[in-house]
Amino acid sequence: MPGPYNFRSQWKTARNLMLSINSQAAWNTRLADANLTYRQRFDGAAALERIITRRSDIAYAGKGTAFATDGQITGYDTKFGGDEAELSPWLAGYMLAFLMGTDTVTTAEHAPVLASLAGTLTVANATDILTGTLSGVMGDGVTAYSITLGTSGTTDTMANLLNNINVTHSAYGIVATLDGPGKNMTFAAAGGDTGAPTMVGAGLSDALAPGIYTHAFTFDETTRTAVPTSIYVEDTEDLHHVYPDMCLDEVTFTINGAGAIMADLSMAGTGIEIAHNLSSLPAAPAETLLLGSDAALTFGPVGDTASFIGRHMSTTLKLQNQLVVHRAPGGGLYGIFVRKGNPKFSVSTTFAAKDTDDIYGRFSGDTACDYELAVNSGASSQMTISIPQMHLKTAKIGYDGDMVVWQVENDETTNYQAAGVPPISLSVTNNIAAYLVPA
């Protein structure tokens, strides 16, 4: 006969976390099930903590005992922390949008330039869509031609344009060559030309392929109110809850030379917990993660930066909102809303030292530096970090094995806003049209 000690244990990897791209249209009102659509992989040890504040009479006299004889609940709080995960482009956009409070979406890339046949036509991603025209004279040196870019399947992408020039219009007497990554095209006169062909670009533009979007993020300084969303957590087979009014308080990205960039987030809420069961959960999504090995850093004095690939060993970026749950008389046991403190951020980077110093002198000379980090793990899996006026707060010598390294740190007190340019901005490219849409 089974004993009373028999039970079905609960394993942590069976826990579930559902997130949403939507913000709440109103405080204290959870998102609908239809909005909780993203099943996030996460550290199974991460926990949603519900904190209950109480009062009692333990410190008072006149009750005949040193112990408490009366008490009651005076407030609830909710906190979610320790959520470490590999960084996907979806999660990067989610974390930055809800923490920084802005999401400016574009599909345009930097406009390409082609001034002559000897130039290079460059796009940001091999799958980008070109528009504009390429025109000039053919290899006979006389006959004019014009190629309209952007025609689907013919001249819209670099690969299609390559075929259009080399095969469809081989009579133009121009040979196009596309590099391995498919982002740079060069041109040359074909053998046997009787004249000198020419080519120039006009009205050129480069846009992300359909369904790919770039999100730009900066700290929203127009309001002190945080952006609320709802999360759904399944802790055990029995305990399933929705937590409304959850706001991003802190985000940390850790970038190393191998593996996925690691992300850690913490959230704070008004204390509301709603027992609820989602009828079905979607499968965990297929993800193209943001990799540390794809992180390319340029760094140096403003206007004189250089690539630090090979010398950039690691970076940790931390962004903070310093959230406070707002309570006031008449608000009941739950927070009324969540407000932000002063935004904070810090960057810790390790550089390999070299024979001619270019780190310590910039620290001791308080040199204004430009820090630009770009992660490109695919057309729809990208992230950038831009700090255009960085002053090194500390520079400590250290070692990686027997190699000398510099460990430098800086934060919001040494990274300045200049000429209206934010002291830090980030971008993420992914397949999400928009975050923060109220629902």
Image: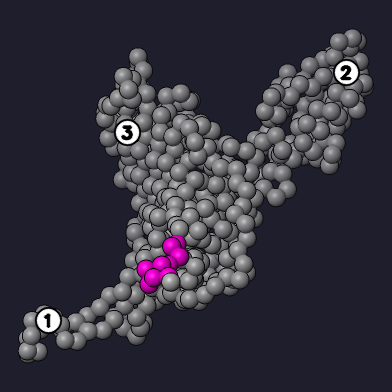
**Residue found 15% across the figure and 82% down from its top:** 68
Given residues 402 and 217, the one toward you in this image is 402
Q: Is residue 77 left or right of residue 427?
A: left
Which quadrant would the C terminus be assigned to in this image?
bottom right
Q: Provide the major secondary structure of the magenta segment.
A: loop
Cα distance between the residues tagged 3 and 2: 54 Å
Q: Which numbered dot is residue 67?
A: 1
Closer to the observer: label 1 or label 3? 1
The residue sitting at 73% across, 21% down in the picture is 186
Would you name the residue on which mark 2 appears? Answer: 173
Q: Report x, y in % for residue 433.
A: 64, 55
Closer to the camera in the image, 83 or 162: 83
Residue 103 placement, left or right of 392? right
**Judging from the image, what secondary structure is the residue with disc 2 in?**
loop
Mark 2 or mark 1: whose residue is earlier in sequence = 1
Question: Residue 175: where, in percent of width, then height?
Answer: 82, 19
Q: Return the residue nearer the eye: 22 or 425.
A: 22
Q: Secondary structure at mark 1?
A: loop
75 in relation to 373, above or below: below
Verify whether residue 9 appears in magenta. Answer: yes
Residue 322 image point, x, y percent:
34, 59
Q: Earlier in the sequence, mark 3 or mark 2?
A: 2
Secondary structure found at label 3: strand
The residue under label 3 is 408
Left/right placement of residue 331 relative to residue 175 reads: left
Q: Badge 1: few (under 14), some or many (20 or more) residues near its Cα, within 10 Å?
A: few
Amino acid found under the numbered disc labelled 2: Gly
| Residue for point 91% across, 15% down | 140
* Left or right of residue 163: residue 347: left
Residue 272 painted magenta: no
